[in-house]
Amino acid sequence: MYWRFFTLVLCQASAAGFAWLLAPKGQALQWTLGMALLGGYLWVVLDSVRGVRLLRWLRDGAVADLALGNGLWGEASDRVRRMLRASSRLTVESESRLKDFLAALQASPNGVVLLDAEARIEWFNQTAADHFGFDVRRDLLQHFGNLVRDPSFAAYLNQRDFLHGINMPGRDSSNAKPVTLSVNLHAYGEGRLLLLSRDITAVEQAEAMRRDFVANVSHEIRTPLTVLAGFVETLQTLPLDDQERQRYLGLMSQQATRMQTLVVDLLTLSRLEGSPLPSTHEWVSVDVLMQQCEQDARDLSHLLLSESHDLVFERVQGCEIAGSALELHSAMSNLIGNAIRYTPAQRRIEVGFNALADGGALFFVKDQGPGIAQEHIPRLTERFYRVDRSRSRETGGTGLGLAIVKHVAQRHGAELTIESQPGKGSTFSLTFPPQRVRSALQVPSLH
Ligand code: ADP
C-alpha cells in the first residue's frame, strides 16, 4: 500500500517538477498543478494496465509466467500464484490418494460397486464385474436394477433396509453348476450405496457336505445300533437256549465290530485332515510295507472265504517312499482289502510296486472282481459312496476306504487312478512322484 502511494506521489511530483522547470514565467503554478494532475492520470492508466494484465492472466490460466513486479498488483499476482500452486499440489495429492483408494478396492477379494442416489453404477471393481458380468464401457451409469434382474435383489434394493444381506444366484449359475453370491448394501453419503458381493459357492458346498456327512454318519451308526438294541431286548425278554443265545451274541458282536470299524475310519479321516503333511525326509521301506500288506491280505482272504483267493504279490526290491508309514500302510491295505472283499473266491488278485522311468513309482492292485460301471468311478472317493451297498456292508465296509486312500495319496503328492469295466475286474493304482521315491541301493553312504 505504501509502495502504491509512493509511486502515485512520485509520478505526480516528477510531472510537477518538469512543469515547474519548463513553465513560462508567471504560469508556473498553473503548469505545476496541471502536470501533477496529468501525472496522477498517467499513474491510474499504468496501474489499470497492470490490473488488466493480472485479470487476463488469471482468465487464461497462465499465471506461471506473470511478472508484475512490486506493488499491489505484484503482490496480488504472487499470492494468486502461490494459492494456485498449493491448490494444484492438493489436487495432485487428492488424485493420487483417490487412485490408491480405487486400487485398494480393485484389489479387494470382494466385489465392490458404488451406486449413486438413483442406484446408477458409478464405479465397480473387476471382481464385481466377474460376479455380475459388467462391462466398464457399457455399464457405467446404468441403473443397477436394470442389469441385475434377480427378484430377491430387486426386493432388497427397494425395501431399503440394509441391515442384513441376501444370497442370490451368480451370473453363471446353472443347475449343474450353481454359483451363489452373498450381496450386502450399505448406505453412505447423500443417498449413495456401497454394494459388496462375495462368492460363497464353496462355503455353501462345504456346509452342504458337512450336513450330508453328519446325516450319513448318523445313519451308519443308527443301523447297527438298532439291530443291537433289538438283540438286547430279545435276550432280555425271551427264554433262549444256550445255542440260540450264542448265535445272538455272535450277531451282536458283528454289529459292534461294524460300529468300531466305522469309528476307526472316521478317526483316521479326521486325523488325515487335521495333521500336518507327512515328512519328505522320513523314508519308509516298501519291502516292509508290502510284507505287512501281504500278511493282512492272506488273513482277510481266509477270514472272508473258505476257499480264499489267488493272491500274487510282485515288487521291486529295496525301494523307499518318503512319508508316513502308517498312512501308506492304511492306503495300500484299503485297496487290497477292497479287492479281496469284492472279488469272488479263487479268482486272481495281483498287487505290485514298480519303479517308473521318470524316477517315480507305481503301486497297483488288480482284481478279477465284478468291476465298476464308468458313471460310478468319479464318485467312488466320496465319503459313504457305494456302488453295491449290501455287498459293502456284508463284508464290513464303511464306505470311507477310498476317501482315506485319496487323502493319503494327496498328502504324499501321489495320484489315485481307477480303471474298471463291469465284469472285467478293476485296477486301482497310486502313482508316486520321483521326489517321494528312492531306491535304497542308491542311498549315499554316510562313511
Ligand atoms: P467300502 O467300505 O464300501 O468298500 P470304499 O470307499 O472302500 O468303501 O469303496 C467305495 C465303493 O467302491 C465300494 O462300496 C464298492 O462299491 C466300490 N469298490 C471299491 N473297490 C472295489 C473293487 N475292487 N471292486 C469293485 N468295487 C469296488
Image (cartoon, helix red, strand yellow):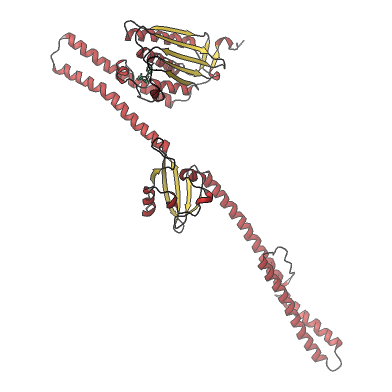
Q: Is residue 350 left or right of residue 102?
A: left
Q: Position of residue 284 (x, y in %)?
A: 50, 14
Q: Nearer the viewer, residue 386 or 233?
A: 386
Q: Position of residue 189 (x, y in %)?
A: 46, 57
Q: Position of residue 129 (x, y in %)?
A: 49, 45
- In which quadrant is the C terminus drawn? top right
| Residue occupying the point 45% across, 47% down | 196
Residue extending farthest left: 239
Residue extending farthest bottom: 26
Q: Quick check: can you spot residue 79?
A: no
Q: Quick check: can you spot residue 78?
A: yes
Quadrant of ligand 1: it is: top left
Q: Classify residue 187 by image quadrant.
A: bottom left
Q: Is residue 55 left or right of residue 15?
A: left
Q: Is residue 48 left or right of residue 105?
A: right
| Residue occupying the point 23% across, 23% down | 226
Residue extending farthest top: 307
Q: Classify residue 398 by image quadrant.
A: top left
